[in-house]
Amino acid sequence: MSQIAVTVLSGFLGAGKTTLLRHILHQQQEYQIAVIENEFGATSVDHQLIGERATRITTLTNGCICCTRSSELEDALLDLLDSLDNGDISFDRLIIECTGMADPGPIIQAFFSHPIICQRYLLDGVITLVDAVHAQQQLDQFTIAQSQVGYADRLLLTKTDIAADSSQLIERLQRINARAPLYQVVHGDIDLALLFNTRGFMLEEQVVPARRSFHFIPQQQNDISSIVVEFDYPVVLNEVSDVMENLLLSFADNLLRYKGMLWINGDNRRLLFQGVQRLYSADWDREWQAEETPQSKLVFIGIQLPEQSIRQAFAGLRQE
């Protein structure tokens, strides 16, 4: 039985999540899509805006699913599976539209903590929309807006048709999240191939895109930022494991996403790892090719991470 791919739509209030979702449902022909949307209050408005193209729309109104303790999201996911298994509905993809004030972290963890959900669903990626008109102010005022950017596998910059020059905003977003490709979107119109099958939670070699060149701009106060660590020497597996365990022990609550490719001493295979907060996984990948220069590359995205301490910890792994 194939797993059901899940896409999480995140972004601050007014960023255009519902507009994008409506575009997806009306443009794509390949998938049968179910939708879970989270709204505050007892009356669903987005349901009416989305239309009738979804296989089923489940609206969660009992608070924000990122912080509620009612397991409402898990219940909704299991209810969809029951309906699917009973033949009441048919769907092969799921989209979760978060509220504008939702932290994606707890939502992501739901797909790694429940045995049935882990088995039946596959978290494909987090798509975060950013309002080009209002984002600078939102990022200054609300750490949750930065957090939404930090968790993203894709960043979609919206309202660029009515915004002023967005170059400083783009650089700021890339400083917060160095691993997420960024695309500009007007009225939700985007090639759906860029949104689906992102494999954001699969162990793969693509740790960060090609290095970006940042120009000097006045430094905004970002609570959340990216740290990219690269080194060209092999490391001992148990020693790098100790570094990661110490990092998680000290700063797990500050880490949002992290991903890496490691050159391990005494092994000709690449080691890939990734994690979300305290949850992480690692596995051996293919062998280094003859034309490749072995190297390690890691990216950490988190809240006020101690960059110097992290770099020193990995620098200490170098064998003399």
Image: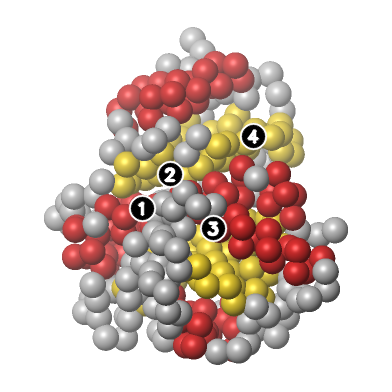
Left or right: residue 90 compared with residue 60 = right
Q: What is the C-alpha distance between the residues marked 2 and 3?
A: 23 Å
Pointer 4: what residue?
Answer: 282
Q: Residue at x 43, y 83 (%)?
A: 45
Ranked by sequence position, the earlier of labels 3 and 4 is 3
Mark 3, residues whose alpha carbon is within 10 Å: few (<14), some, or many (≥20)?
some
Q: Nearer the viewer, mark 1 or mark 4?
A: 1
Pointers 1 and 2 in contact (C-beta within 8 Å) = yes
Q: Which residue is label 3 attached to?
A: 72
152 on left or right of 15:
right
* Amino acid on which disc 1 is placed: Ser
Q: Nearer the viewer, mark 3 or mark 4?
A: 3
List the residue tagged with mark 2: 256
Single out the residue that lies furthest toward the top.
320
Around disc 1, counting alpha carbons within 10 Å, would you say few (fewer than 14), some (14 to 19), or many (20 or more)? many
Quadrant containing the N terminus is bottom right
Question: Which comes before the other along the chain, label 1 or label 3?
Answer: 3
- Give the CA separation, mark 4 to mark 2: 17 Å
Q: Which mark is residue 208?
A: none
Secondary structure of the residue carrying tag 4 is strand
Disc 3 to disc 4, C-alpha distance:
30 Å
State if disc 4 and disc 1 touch (CB < 8 Å). no
Q: Secondary structure at mark 1?
A: helix
Q: Nearer the viewer, mark 4 or mark 2?
A: 2
Work out whether 46 lies above or below 212.
Answer: below
Tell me the quarter of the picture where residue 195 sits: bottom right
